[in-house]
Image: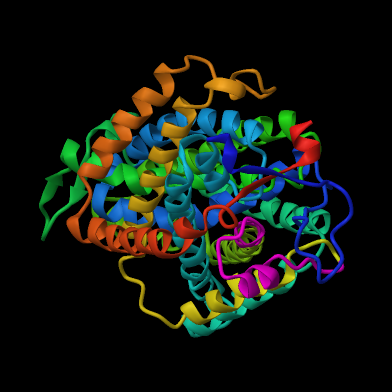
Amino acid sequence: MTDTLRSAPAADPVPEGTSDRPQTLKRSIGVVGGTLLTLSCVTPASTLFVVVPDLFGSLGTATALTIAIGSLLCIAVAFCYSELGTLIPSAGGEYAMVSTLAGRLAGWLVFVLSLLVVLIVPPVIAMGTADYLAPLVHLDPAMAGAGVMLLATLAGLLDLRANAWITGVFLVLEVIAAAVVALLGFTHSHRGPGSLLSMQVAGTGHHTDTVTGMLVVSGLAIALFVTQGFSTAVYLSEELENPRRTVARTVLATLAISSVIILVPVVAITLGASDLKELTGGDISSMVTAWSNTAVGTFVSLCVALAIVNAGIVMVIQNSRVLFASARDKAWPEPVNQLFAKLGRFGSPWVATLAVGVPGALLCFVNLDTLYGVTGVSVTAMYLLVAVAALLARRGAHRETPAWRMPLWPAMPVLLIAVLAYILSQQEMSYLLWTGGITAVATLYWALYLRPRHATHWLVSIPEDARA
């Protein structure tokens, strides 16, 4: 499938008006900067306070176990990303890797799934800002979310190195918040470690319901989403120095750190909740206040609000790189491609940044009740296609290409494909239909527009310095 590839020169950006040479991004960050940005996209604190409460509501004491299983599965996923990200270091991320190794249609579907995830998730997380600013000021969630998205868009227009330091400072604060929650939870334990395996959730009245193994499997789609942001390292691969080494290190380091930052407080909350009703309610801020005092609760809430802003900045950066790469690879009509491929004075794709940030602000005013279900299905399906590409990564010329190579290949991707397919089969039909409908529309676009123009459109680019 390597006929889909073309080189993107690593020289200076192409002057305005030229379209025969693909634009390239500037290499400006190493492993530390890449890990800070990638961790900020995982955004452990906002994930802990915004996403995990929904899992507590449905899984109760089985939440920590489900996240732990999801983190173990993500090790295999991270191996696939590390190998493919060093083999195909493109700002297109998953779609560039899958297009190259599994064919253009598969790559296009991965692009649509990734775009679905990265466009919808930031505004919904951003709307959570209002809840955590409540100790200081009461804001409308939609207005607060829109403000966060616009702020993140402005930050996304800056140089990537500057953003690495901004997000690094915010990241320290959210790690402190997660550590405070963990410490308080462990020091106010109401149940023993055995409760982590009891799989109980509060039922109606004073009854306790048992969480079934099937419900845990169903929850794995969301659990995979909890640490999903480690893939950002692949999107940043064109801006990482020496990507053949730094991409794999950044992916694996981010997964390890984020899993600990998220899982340890989840265990502490499970042990520290006074009863199953409080745990299932998922109001972590109220738990923190009850364990300490109002001042500590306010501090943690403000740190979470900053974490959400941090996540918004990095997600806008990531999303703009995906849109930039898709335009450079001719996924759209030519006038649209030329707009999205423009680079600003700081080396960032400014039109693509505005194109993902401004609609994100508008989405804050839309009801997105099915977000997490659709996102979980999309992430699982995307990981499945990445695993298929990893299974094909050592054919022909790719066998000799310098890249980080995963251990236990091909057993690792084969096992991952089987597990992810089973997880997909256990998801709610409505979420599968939503995702399937979007995928069907994307396939129609491919059949009617991209495929007839296969010689000039959807041509994956890799910078020359990465191919050397």
Q: Is residue 27 magenta?
A: no
Q: Image height check: is 73 above or below 146?
A: above
Residue at left offset 60%, top offset 36%: 257
263 or 333, nearer to the observer: 333
Location of residue 242 by image quarter: top right
Q: Residue furthest top?
A: 408
Name the foreground residue: 161 vs 334. 334
- Tell me which residue sits at (53%, 47%) in the image: 95
Say left or right for 168 vs 117. Answer: right
Give above or below for 182 relative to 390. below
The image shows residue 125 at horizontal and vertical percentages of 49, 65
Q: Residue at x 21, y 48 (%)?
A: 201
Q: Is residue 111 left or right of residue 279?
A: right
**Left or right: 430, with 305 as reference point:** left
In the image, the segment drawn in magenta is 321-345
Report the magenta stretch's main SS: helix
Q: Residue 336 appears at what percent x and percent y?
A: 62, 73
Of residues 160 and 53, which is closer to you in this image? 160
Specify the quadrant of the image occupied by residue 338. Answer: bottom right
**Residue 310 position by quadrant:** bottom right
